[in-house]
Image (cartoon, helix red, strand yellow):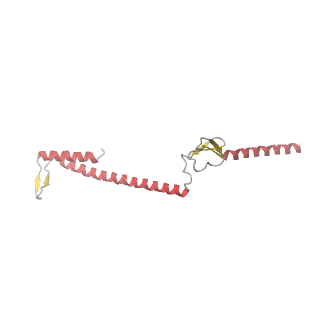
Amino acid sequence: MKGIKDWAGMISLAVLLAFSAMAAAEDEKMYSWVDANGEAHYSDQPPPPEVKEYRSMTRSGSTTGTAASAAPAGESLADRDADFQRRRAEEAEEEARAEAVAAERKQNCTLARSQYNTISAGGRITRRNADNEVVYLDENEIAIETERARAEMEKWCDS
């Protein structure tokens, strides 16, 4: 009976070691690329830096990327981080510009709408002439001003 227990323990240990070896092999990467002469290469080491396109895969066959989607060879983590930070700063500046333009459009819309409402409400409209004297607009001048105010409102207001 003791021999059977030893035998079962050895089999269990062998199975455990086999599964451990298979799991370790699954994590190993393989690389494939074609050199300048058109010759295909397969290795467990990354290709030389002059190779621009290659495939990286695990032994199980799952592809983990290509050189085209990865960072260029020789680019350090600090360089990639600095590039990322630069892009984030540019995006933040662009967003700030867009917000400033939106705020200006909103302010101009409010002014244009107010002018249009004032002119189209009816009544007498006055302006100052070149001599700084108050003059009243006639019906034709009011129609022209109403059209100008409507055009400004359409220019600045979205609705």
Q: Residue at x 46, y 56 (%)?
A: 86
Q: Residue at x 13, y 53 (%)?
A: 126
- For this orientation, the residue located farthest to the front is 37
Q: Along the horizontal axis of the image, is 87 left or right of 109?
A: right
Q: Quadrant of the C terminus?
A: top left
Quadrant of the image occupied by residue 63: top right
How many discs mark residues in the rendered view? 0
Task: Please determine whether, in this image, residue 131 is positioned above or below residue 4.
Answer: below
The x, y position of residue 5, in whole percent, is 85, 44
> Could you tell me residue 26's position as x and y percent?
67, 44
Q: Is residue 121 visible?
A: no
Q: Quadrant of the N terminus?
A: top right
Instruction: Name the one closer to the observer, 118 or 51.
Output: 51
> Residue at coordinates 64% horizontally, 43% vertically from top-left?
41
Residue 64 horizontal/vertical position (percent): 60, 45
Residue 157 visible in the shown view: yes
Residue 37 position, x and y percent, is: 59, 42
In this image, 89 relative to 118: left or right?
right
Residue 14 horizontal side relative to residue 3, left or right: left
